[in-house]
Image (spheres, rainbow, N blue to C red):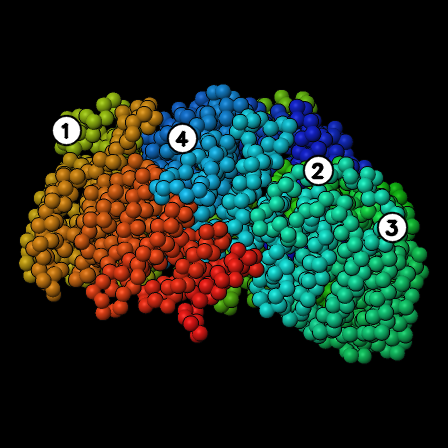
Amino acid sequence: MSLDISSLIAEFAEELFSGDFPISMDELDTSVDVLESPSDDIAAELVSDRSAYEKQKATLQTYLDSLPYECESIDVMQAKLEYIVGKLIVCAKSKNWLVLTTWDAILQCWLQMRYPMMTSTRATLVRFYYELCLLPGIEVRVIRSWADMLYRLLGSKTVKRKLEATDLQLPWKPLWDLLYKELFPKNRLAEFQGNRNLNNILLYVAESCKRYFPATDIPDMLETFLPIFTPDTTLTMIPVLTSFLPPTHTHIYLPVIFRIWEAFNSHIMDDRFLELAGILAEEHVTGKEGLAGEEGGAAWKDVGIWTQEEWLMLVSKGIESLYVPVGNSSQSVATTAVQADASAARQGSKVKKSISRISSLAKLIVYSMALDGPIRGDSASTPESPNSQPMGYLAGSKALDSLDKLITSTESFFHPSNSGHWTFTLTNLLQRLTVEFADRWLEEQQPSCTTPMAHRLTPSLRRAFVNVLRTPAFLAMFSKDSFSISMAQGALRTMALLEPTLIMPELLERAYGGLEVVNETHRTTAVLKMLSGISLPLVSEIIWRPGQKHLLPLLELCLPGIDLNDPNKTTCATLFIVSAMQHVKVGDLSMHHSGFALSGDAPGEELMEVDTEDIHIPEGVEMSPFVSLGRQEERTLVRESTAGFADWVTSLFRRVLALYENLPEEGGKKKTTGGKSEETVLKSIKSMLDVVTLHLSDQLFDLVLNLVFDYAATNAKSNAIRAFGQLVACLARAQPQKTLNKFLPSCILRIQEELKYGASSVRTTSTHDLVPSDTTLHWNMSILRGCLAYGAHALLKHKEDIIDLLSLLLNKTKNERGYTSTAAIVTRVMHALSGVYPSDNRFVNEDVWNQPEFGKTHNTQWGRLYEAKDVKVEWHVPSTEEVQFILDVLDRVAAPALDKLETLARSTHHWDEVVRNDFCRYLLFVRSVWSGLPSFLKEGSKDIVHPCIDPETELEGLLVDHLDVKAGFILTDPNDPRYQQALQHRIRFGNVAHLAAVALRQIQGGEDHLDAVVAVVKAIDTYFLDYGMSRGDFITLQKNFAQSREVNRVSARQKENSRVAWVKRAQVYHCGRLYIHALYRRRSSLDDTLLKEDLAELCLSPYTRVRRLAQSVLHSTCGSYVRATRYIMPSIFNALSKGNDPDRIKGALYVLGNKGTAALTMSEPQVRRQYLVALLECQHEEKPSIQKLVTTFSTECLIHLSEEAIRTSAYTAPTPGVEASIRALEEEFSPAVVDIKLTKAAMECAAKRAKRCLEETDKTVRFILEIASRPTTHWRYVHMAMKFLMGFLRRDAVAPPELARFFMAQTLSPQPGIRASAEQAIVKTAVLMKIRAYAKTDDELWLCKWQSPFARTISINNPPAFLAQLYQPVNEADGFYVDLLDTGFLAWTKTIKCYPLNLTNSVPWDLASRQCLQAIHDFIGESYLTQLATLWSQESSKASGSPHLHAENVMFMITLAKLFNGEHMHLILPIIEPLMTDADKFKQAAAAEMLTGLLRGSKHWPRQTREELWSWLTPRFDVILTQAKPDTISYWTSFLEHTLLNLDPRRFQPLVDWILALHLDFQGDSAFSSESLSLTKALNVIVVFIDSVGVRFNGVSEKYASIFFNNADSNYAEIRTSIANALCLIAKYQWRPAYPSVDALLAACAESPDPLRIRQGFFSYHVQSIINNLPKWKDERFPPPRVSQSRYDKVGLTMLLWLWVSLYSPEACLVRPHAMALLPELLSMSELSDNPELQKYSSAVLRVFSSVHLPPSLTHIVLENLVSAIQSSESWRIRLHALPALVVFFYRNLLTISSNGVLKVMDVLLDCLSDENVEVREMSSKTLSGVVRCSQRQNIIPLKNRFISLARSVKLPSRTHHDYGESLRKLHSAILGLCALIESSPYSVEPWMPSLTEVLARHATDPPPISTTIRHCASEFKKTHQDTWHKDQLAFDEDQLQSLSTMIVGTSYYA
C-alpha cells in the first residue's frame, strides 16, 4: 500500500488523449489487469448472510448506478456468458487450443464487466481451466494463459474469496504427475527443455488451487512428497510442499515442517516457510470456529496457533531476516543461508518466486496477537534488587511482547545517522505491520467476522501496538532514501488513523519544526511528504478534533516551498496542498460567524463520534497547542482561522505566476519547457491548481479569476505559454461558464488582430523554436485551448464564434507551431463536446456543495468519506445541440479541408513548399477532429471482403467476436440520418488518407516530403486506432484510480473512501466498456486497402523515421483487428525475397520479428515455414545490420519451435479430464449452450487440421534441410538451420534418415558451435527415439512414465536390509543394480526402480527407427572416430575459468555407446590410448570425455564387451593418476564424477576397488615432494568419489573419518582443506534419519525431541579425543617464526576449516554439537596473536556460529560456554574476542534466553566493566547498553544507584601514588556504566537521566580515559536527540543543561 504519492491526484481526461501512439499488443495477449475495486463487496458486506450471488448483484448495482446510461440486464449478460462458454466448449471438444485461447480473452472482457456469476458456474469454469492446464505436451505459453485465466476466475483475495473449499474440489495428483517430470527431468531430456518456465507456472497453479485439494488427501501428499525429500532435492521439494498442502488440518503436517526447517540452513526454505506461517496465522485466526471447522481448524496454543517453541523459532528466523549488523560486525551476518543454497543445488534450483519475507513476518506477528497472558507491570519506576525479572507481557499479548523486544533491539538502526542496506527492510517491516494490523482491526469490526471474542484485538492492544512502533517510525521519517521515507510515511499514516491522539501531536511538532527551518531542505521535504500522508486526520474533525485549526498555518508555511530552484521541494509542497485541499472547501467562514447557533443543527452532527479518548493527554504536552479542547471551542478556532484563506489563495497564485515567469524557454522536438525536472514541477503545479480551484468558494473563485485575467491581459510570456494555458484550463474545469465568458471575447479579438498583422504566416512543416513576433498569438491560443477544454454546455452559447474562429485559424496559421496549436484546440473542442466524462470532482456531492447551509458550516464536513452507494456522479453526456455542433464543424470546417486535400493529392506533378505546407496543415486538422471523437460513432456491421480463413481447417463460427456492451457511444443507430452523415465524413477521411498515401508514392522525390509522409502515417493511425479507448490510456486510468483509492483507505475492507476515488471508479468502469469495443474489430474493404497497400508499404520505407512510426502503428492495428496480421503477411514475405532493396528487407524483418507477430507466425504451420525459410534465405544480403537482425530474430523464434508447439496445433490425444469438465459445464448451462452443427463441423476440421499441420511440418523440415545442405550456404546459416531442425525433432515421430545423416556429417564440422549443436541434435534424436520405443500410451510418452525394458520395480519391505544389500558385491544369479537412490532420507518410498543383472532384453525398434539408426551407424568407422578425437582435442576458443569436460561431447559419446552396445569399442580404445598420457591438456580432456561416455554408456552392454573394457582400463588407472598434473587433474576428477553420479557404483567395481585401495601417505616431508602432490591427487579423487556415490560410501566412511581425524595435522593447506571438505561430506551422507514409513516419521516429529537426529554429532568420539589433546599440544607449541608448524596450530586450523565449511553448508546443524564442544577452544585460539591465520579463522567461526539459529534447548549451553570463557579466562584478549560474539548471540536469541541466562550475562558484563584492560572495559560498556535496552529496562534504577555510589566512593590520588591505577580503573568502570545507561535509551530522555549529567560533569576534566569516555557519550547523546531537542531540553533544569555542555566541551575556561 505504500505509494509514491507524487502522481496521485492526476487529472481526468485532460491528459488522456495527448499520447500519439497507444501501446501495441499481441493478437493473442489481451490481458488487462482487472483492478480489484475498493473492497468490492462493499455494498455487499451490509448483509452478511445473503448468498454470494446476491452480494455480487449488490456490488454490480453500485457500478451501474454510477453510469449515465442504461446498461445490460443480468440476463442479457448471462446469455453472453453462455455464448462464450459455448465457443470454449466447441474449441475444447475439437482440441483447437489456439483458438480457445482467443476466446479466453473474450471471457476476460466479460469478467471485466463485473456481472455476477453463480458460484457453481465459477467452480465448473475453474475446473475446466484446471483440467486444461493438466494437458500433457501443450506449449508453455498456452498453459500460461490458462493458468492466468484460472487465477482471474478464482480472484485474488482482497476482501472475500470467490470460492470456498466447499464449492469446489480438484484432484492434485495429475498436477503432481505433470510437475514431477518438469522438476526431475530425465537426464538427457533436461538438456533440451532449456529454461522454459513450466515448473513455475504449474507451481503457481498448485498454489492458487491448494485450498481446493481435498484435505483428506494430505496424508497421501506427505506419503508422496516426503520419501523423495533428500538433501539434494530440498530446494525443489520445499516449494512443492508449500504449494500443494491445503491450509487446513495443519496439525498433520506442521510438526514435520518445523523439524525439517530446523535441520537445514537455507535461505529459500526460510522464505517459503515464513510465507506459509504468515498465511496459516491469518487463515486460522478464527481457530476452530472458522470455515475449516472443528476438524480442519488449527487450535490456538501458546502464541496464536503456535507452540512456544515454534513461535520462538519463527520470530528468531524473522529477526534473522532483518539483516541488522548487531554486535558491530560490519558485514551483515545472515549470509550463510544464501551461500548454502548456492552450494546445495547440484541441479540448480529451477523454482523461482519472489517472496516478501517481511510481509509474511508482519502477517505472522499481527495475526498471532491476542490477550493471552498476564499484563506486564511497568516496574522501571520502583527500584528493586538489580536482579528482578518482569513478569507478564506487554498489554497482555505474547506476540506483541516479542514484537516489542524485536523493535527495541533494532531501534537504533532506524535513525538516519545509522542507515544502511537494512533501513529499507526495517521501514518496510513497520509499514507492513501497520497495514496488517489495520486490516485485521477492520475485519474484526464487521458483523460477519467469525473470530472468537477471546482472540480479537482490543483498544488497549491497539494503543500498545502504536506505542511500540511510534518511535522508530518518527526516526525513520527522515531517512536518507526516498523508499524508506515513503515506508515510514505509510506506517505513520496508518497509525495516525488508528490512534490519532498518540501520533498527531508529535507529528505536528516535527512538522512546524521542519517547515520553519529554511536551511535543512531534507527535513523540509520529509515533513511535507509526511503531512501529505496524514492530511485526512488533519482536516477531519471526526478522526482527530484538534487538527483543523492547524491547516492554515501549515499551508502558509509551505508556500515558500514552491520554488523553481528546488524541484523536489516544490513537488512535495504541491503534494501536501493537493492532499489537504481535496478534502476541504476553501471559503471564509469567519464572516458567517455572527448569529449562527454552533450546536445541534449543524449538518453532519450525526456523523460525529464522541471523542472519548481526550482523557489520555500524552505526557509532557499538558500546555502544548496540540491538546484537544471541547468541540465548540475547536470549531470556533477553526472558523476564525478560515479568514486567512483569501490571503493564502492570492499569495499561492502570485507565487505560481512568479514561478512561471522564471521558466526556461519552451522548445525542442516535443515542445517541452526545460528539462525533466521543470516538466515535473509544472505537472505537479497543474495537479495542485486543479484541486485548489475546484474547491474554491464562489467569492474566492471570482477573486482568482480576476487576478488571472488581469495577468493574461497585460502579459504575453513566451516561456510560459503552455503553463499559463494549463492554469486557465484549471479554472475552466472548476467553473467553465464563468471562465469562458471572461476570456473568450478578448482572446478572439486578439487572435484576429495578430493574424491580421501576419503572425504565423511564414510557412514551415518541421518543429522549430518560437518566432518572437508570434508570442501574443500563441499566448492567446493557449488560453483559448484552456477555456475550451471543459464544459460543453458553455461552448454552445459561443457556437458561431468558435466555428468561425476554427476556420480562420485553419486558413491563417501556416507555421508548424501555429497549425499544431490549432489542431490541439479543435481536438479539445471535439472532446469536450462528444465525450462522456464525469464533470464534477469535488469532495462532496454537488447537491450538498450547492446548499447555502453548507457554505456556512462546511468545516464540519471537511474530510468527509462516502460509501459507493451514496455518491452521485455528475456526468457530461452530449445533448442533441452538442451533436449538431459537432456535425456542423465536420460540415463547415472539416469538409472544406478534405476538399483541399483531395485537390492537392490529385495535383501531384508540381509539389513545392507551399503545397506541402497546405497538405500537412489540412491533414493534421482533419486528423485532429477525429482524434477528439473516439466515442462519437459506433462501428456497425461491416462487409468483410478478406476474412483470411482457410475453409478446410477453420470455421467462421469460431472466429473470435468482440463482446458488444453498451459504452455510451452517441450515434449508434444506422437509420439515424445523423449517423449516416457522420459515417460518410469518417469514410471520406479514410479515403483521403489512402489517396494521399498513393499520391506521395507517385511524386518524384515524394519521400523527400518526409513531413507529409509522417502526417499520412499519423492520419492512418487516427483512422484505425482512435476508437473507443486505447489500451495505454485505459491502463493509465486504472493505475490512477488504484492510487487515489489507496490514499484514503487503511485496508481493502474499508467501505468508505473519498468521493474522488468513487468518481474515478465510475470512470474506469465506463472506459473499460469503451476499451472492449476497441478490441477484436472486423475489417471493411477500406480498412484492408489502408492496411495492406498503405500501412504495410510504409513499414518498408527507406526512411527509418517513417518505417519506425508505421511499424508501431501497424502492430497496434494488428492487435485491434481480427486476422489483420494474416492479411498483410504475403506482402511482407514478398519484400524479403531476393532483389529487394536492403531497406525494404530490413523493414520486413522488423515487422516479422516483432514479438507478437512472431508468436503468431510461429503458431501457424504454413506461415511458420515461410518465415523460417525466408530468414535462411537472407544470406544473400551483405549489410551487417541485416545480418544482425536475422541472427536476433532467428534466436528469438527458437522458443516457439518445440515439439509441444507442433503437438499443440495438431493435438489428437484423448483428453478424459477435459471431457469430464465439459460435461459439468454443459449441465451448468441451458441445453442450447453448445451449437451441435458447429461442433460437428469443428470435429471434422480437427482431423484435417492435424493432418495438414504434420504435413506442413515435414515439408518445412525438408525445405530447411535442403538449404542447410547446399555447399554455398554460409556456416552461420548452417548453424541456424541446425537449430531450427533440432526444434522440429519430436517424440511422436522419428527423424527421417537424411536428417540423421546431416547431423552426423556436421559432428565433424570445423566450427565448434555447429559441432556442439550437431552432437546435441544426435543425442536428442536418439533419446526421443528411445522414448517412443519404450512408451506404450500417449500419457506414458508425454508424462515420461515409460518403463525401460531393462528395468524392474521392486518393493522395499525392509529398508535396512535393502541398504545393506547395496553395500555388498552384486549377486551373479539374481542380483540387481539400483542406479538412482533418490529416497530413504526422511522415509522410504514403497518401491524402487532397479536393473536386474542378467537381462537379455533388447529395445523393440520399429522400422523407421531402424532406418534412422542405420544412417547413424553407417557414419561411424575408424576414420570418423579419429577425426572426432582430433577435433575434440583442439584448444577451445571459449576461455573458461576452470578446466572442465564438454557436456555435449560426453552426452554424444554416451549416446553412441548406448545405441550400438559397444560394438565400436575396439576402434575407440586405441584412439584414446595415446591421448590419455599426452602432455597437451586438451588431448587429455578429449580422452576423459570419450572414456566417460564409454563407461556411462556401457550400462546395458553385453557382459563380455563390458569385461573387455574393464580389463583394458583397470591397469591404466595408475598411469592416469601418476601423470596427471595440477592443470589436468580436474579433467580426471570430472571424469570420475560424471561416470559415477546417479549410477550404481557396483557397475564400476574395478574402478571403486582401485579408488578404495589408494594409499594415503600423510607423512611425506619435504614441501615439494612428489608424495605431497600424489597425496593431494589421491585425496581429490576420494573427495569426488564420496560426493558422487553419496550414501553408498557409508559402508567405509567410518574408516576414512578416522584416517582424516588422525592426520588432521598435515603441513599443507590444500590437504587440510580437502580433509575439511571430506569430513563435511561424510557427515552429510551419514545423516539419514530414514524412517520405515511416513507415518512413523510423522509420529516421531510429533513426539520425539530430536526426530531428525541432528543433535547427536557423527564424530563425537574423534572430536573429544582432539579436545583432550589440545591443552597438551598447546604447551608444546614452537616459538615464532615456526609457530605455524606446531601440531596445535595445524590441527586447530583443520578443525576450524571443517567447522567453517560445514556452517556454510545446507546441513550446518550437523556440525553444531561439535562446534559447541569446541567452543572453549575456539575462544582460546582467538587470542593467539602469533598465528594470524588461526586467529582470523577462529573469530570468523565464532561470529558465524553465534549467528546461526539455535533451538531453545541449546541456547543456554552456548551461553554458559561463552560466559564461562569470559569469566574464567586468564587473557584479556579472549574476553575482547568473546564479547562481540556474546552480543550477536544475545541479540539473535533474544527471546529464547531465560531470565537466569540474562542475569549471568549482566554479571559478566559488570565484571568486565572493571577489567584491567581498557579495551575490554569499553567493549563491555557498549555491550551493556545494548543488553539493558533490549531486556533490562526494569533494572536501570538499581544499576544507576550502584554506579553512582561507586563513582562517589573513589577519590583519584595523585599520579605517583601506588593506588592511582587501581582507583582510575574503578572510577572509569563507574563512569562507563553510567554512560552505558544513558546510551541505552538513545531517543528519549528518561526521568532518571538529567540528574546523571551532574555526576558526569564533575569528572569531565579527569584524566583520560575518563574524560574521553564522557565526551564521547555526550556527543552521541547530542546526535541522537537533535530531532527532538526542542522538547527534550524541557526535562533538564538550568544547572543540568550547563553540566551537559561541560560534558561536551570538557573544562570550562573559568573553572
Q: How much space separates mark 1 and mark 4, taking CA atoms?
A: 51 Å
Q: How much space separates mark 1 and mark 2, taking CA atoms?
A: 89 Å
User: Which-is-in-front pick, marks 2 and 4?
Assistant: 2
In primary-sequence order, the first of circles 1 and 4 is: 4
* Numbered label attached to residue 1230: none
Q: Residue at x 85, y 74 (%)?
A: 714
Q: Give residue 528's position: percent from left, percent from top.
A: 63, 58
Name the residue carrying label 1: 1371
Q: Residue at x 57, y 30 (%)?
A: 126
Q: Give residue 151's position: percent from left, percent from top.
A: 56, 37
In primary-sequence order, the first of circles 1 and 3 is: 3
User: Which-is-in-front pick, marks 1 and 4?
Assistant: 4
How many numbered dots are placed on residues in this image?
4
Q: Which amino acid is tagged 1? A: Asn
Q: How much space separates mark 1 and mark 3, taking CA atoms?
A: 110 Å
Name the residue carrying label 4: 307
Q: Which amino acid is tagged 4? A: Thr
Secondary structure at numbered mark 2: loop
* Numbered label attached to residue 610: 2
Q: Give residue 579's position: percent from left, percent from top.
A: 69, 53
- Residue 274 vs 652, above or below: the answer is above
Secondary structure at numbered mark 3: loop
